Amino acid sequence: MKTFDFRHAESVDDAVNAATHGATYFAGGTNLFDLMKTGVEQPSALIDLRRLAMTSITTTDGGGAFIEAGVTNSAMANHSLIRRHYPVVSHAILSGATTQLRNMATAGGNVLQRTRCPYFMQNAFSECNKRKPGSGCAAINGFHREHAIFGASEHCVAVHPSDMAVALAMLDAVVHVQNTTGRRHIPIGQFFALPGQTPEIDNTLQPHDLIVGIELPPSGFSDHCWYLKVRDRHSYAFALVSVAAGLHIEGGEITGAALALGGVAAKPWRLYEAESSLIGQRPDAHAFHAAAAIAMADAQPLTQNAFKVDLGRHSIVRALTLAAVDRGTDSSV
Ligand code: SF4
């Protein structure tokens, strides 16, 4: 393995300063270490963020929640504020990885994890535009059963692996970042990048940006939400398709809806047209099937993953059906 320097950051400013001198941010390391072991990532220095005490979850002045970037996935999923007001986030997190990984992985790192496309994860494969720009995409003519059906390009068809990010996208979360010029906010819908001509770029962070927290808006669809994950085995597997669904229901009518898909694109895929179709409808099978048909109408599957279109349609109906069940203040996950 290539050697590298390692030290703990004394403050956020110290961490950002270290990044400007070439260091890579390190928190849980659950994805970064995998990539370092295979040589995909070869940092010359790591700046460890774990002593910065960015580990709290608080209520915001506007009635939402702010999750500091160093909160572990386990702590976030099990926090009373998240369980009560954002159960879809708890569901999503607990459906991913393993207990051991969730105990190490952080909120900030979760949204930064790289695709698990097998051609990206191994340096032995010569073609991967995301890992080695201009080298080609081995997946397009190779194994792509688990790859994208929305938003892909001729240069990359990978999907984003995060479950948590799908719930964050459904909730219109906001990512807070800091660099040498100060802090700024990035709506989650503008955070992830589609591959286009530059598949090596996963998100809209600028060089040296450090994620310091994630803000959730007041409305968590807490009474009517669901995260459904469909995968090849029941645990420790990435989604073939996942759905984060939230509904507001008043007087037997849908007054608000939010839907996002995972496992289908390089970013969590919001379904705005399908959401609009639900407004004013009764929360029944007719409305859910119609929304699901709209949601999947523009899918562009590859030869091995056309099954994701039907799977997505059925998963949307199932997630909406489960979300429509009135759970009141039940925070169980
Ligand atoms: Fe690389 Fe993307 Fe192609 Fe996978 S799909 S081989 S990550 S360029």
Image (cartoon, rainbow, N blue to C red):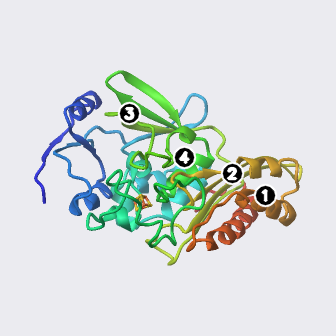
Q: Are marks 2 and 1 in contact (CB under 8 Å)?
A: yes
| Residue 325 seen in the current view | no
Residue 82 percent across, percent down from the top left: 54, 49
**Residue type at numbered disc 4:** Leu
Mark 3 or 4: the one toward you:
3
Q: Earlier in the sequence, mark 3 or mark 4?
A: 4
Residue 69 appears in the rendering: yes
Rounded to the nearest whole Å, what is the CA distance between mark 2 and mark 1? 9 Å
Provide the residue designation for mark 1: 291
> Between 225 and 173, which is closer to the camera in this rendering?
173
**Along the polypeptide, which appears first: circle 2 or circle 4?**
4
Work out whether mark 2 precedes mark 3 in sequence or the reverse, and give the earlier one.
Answer: 3
Residue 243 horizontal/vertical position (percent): 63, 60
Q: Which mark is residue 81?
A: 4
Position of residue 268 in the picture relative to residue 43 (left or right): right
227 or 224, nearer to the observer: 227
Which residue occupies 58% across, 66% down?
241
Q: Which residue is mark 3?
A: 206
Up-down relation of residue 10 to residue 94 (above or below): above
If you read the primary sequence from the N terminus, does the residue marked by circle 1 or circle 3 appear first?
3
Question: For mark 2, what is the residue?
Answer: 271
Amino acid on which the number 1 mark rests in the picture: Ala
